[in-house]
Amino acid sequence: RIRAGEPDPFDEDDAEEFAPQVCRNDAMRSLLKSRTQIERQPAADTEDLIRIDRYVPELGDGSTSSPFLVLHNEILQTVERLVPSVPEQSCRHRAIARVEAAAQSIWPGCSVEVFGSYEADLSLYCSDVDLTVVNTGVGGVRSAVIDGLRQLGQALRARGAAVDVEVVKATVSILKFVDPYLGSSFDVCLNSPQRQVSRQLISTTLSTFPAFRPLFIVLKAFLVARDINTTFEGTCGSFLLFTLVLSYFERTADPTCSLGHHLFAFFHLYSSVLEQTRVGLRCSTAAGPGRWIQGGYFLKHMQGWQDDSRPDS
């Protein structure tokens, strides 16, 4: 902030350099003030109707026709920097192999499978890796699962393949640890019954909505930067974020919009439109062979889920 009487630190050269950005900022402010809701701009004589996974070509003056299209390009560039690089993926694959070797020392014939965000290419470079150990012979009794996870944690420590080992007891208990060579966190469960369902849901979503992946990754980074991305702490984990983004695309999104429009519309929907104290949401999901439950919104009290002591739950 410049105090009264102090010289302006920006000279005329600075003003000339930043003039294009000032114009873009003013255009964005004017656009937001003139709209009471986010909606797609009509197709212009430039590249408004675009493929989501492609950059918008710039005009001759180095700009694009819309601030939302500038944001579209910035989102794609940001995603390229947020996802794991090829060397990082190679290191993670070696870490997964170490987990499988430790598991097979306890349960010969078992195998380790990757699921969740990392398997679906929806993870950040700093994201946890979700693993499940299958064919262990461990039953579904909670105490047996917890004992099995403790054995696996001890085997990993003995091999020098894990630090900060912890067993989290929950509906689906998990083993959490950090790989000392990679520095990444891993979450391991035993015989997860939901992995096939989640794979089908993620695969269908990504093929149906091409804009889902870049929007999801940027929003995930937004949550991580604010440390509000941990499920068991009551904040927004990956599954909840997946549900919010999927519901947005199913119910409100125009598939021809740019990513800039999608980002603004997503925040507008969940910050200003959806009345979270009274309304819940569900996503379309498979209910068995040939059966499909249509997603939508519902009133919480109609499901017996209204809790005035926890209005946002």
Image (cartoon, grey):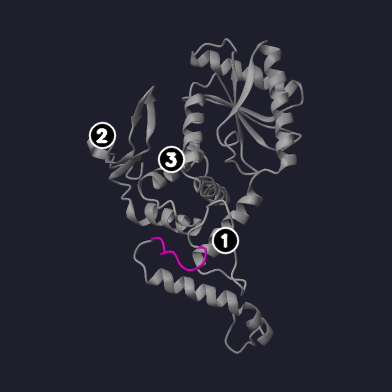
Chain part drawn in magenta: 39-47
Image quarter in which the C terminus is found: top left
Foreground disc of the pair 1, 3: 1
Label 2 SS: helix
Task: Relative to 245, say whether 154 is above or below.
Answer: above
Residue at image mark 1 = 56
Q: Residues within 10 Å of mark 3 (few under 14, many from 20)?
A: some
230 or 124, which lies in front?
124
Label 3 SS: helix
The total number of labels drawn is 3
User: Would you identify the image quadrant in which residue 114 lies?
Assistant: top right
Q: Badges 3 and 2: C-beta atoms under 8 Å apart?
A: no
Q: Residue at x 74, y 27 (%)?
A: 161
Image quarter in which the N terminus is found: bottom right
Disc 1 to disc 3, how far (Cα)?
Answer: 28 Å
Foreground disc of the pair 3, 2: 3
Label 1 SS: loop
282 or 223, which lies in front?
282
> Disc 2 marks which amino acid?
Gln
Report if residue 263 lies within the magenta region: no
| Image coords of residue 49 (percent x, y) | 48, 59
Disc 3 to disc 2, how far (Cα)?
Answer: 19 Å
Q: Which mark is residue 243?
A: 3
Q: Residue at x 63, y 49 (%)?
A: 82
| Image coords of residue 105 (percent x, y) | 71, 13
| Image coords of residue 251 (percent x, y) | 35, 46
Q: Which mark is residue 303?
A: 2
User: Would you identify the image quadrant in which residue 86 lies?
Assistant: top right
**Residue 207 located left or right of residue 107:** left
> Disc 3 marks which amino acid?
Thr
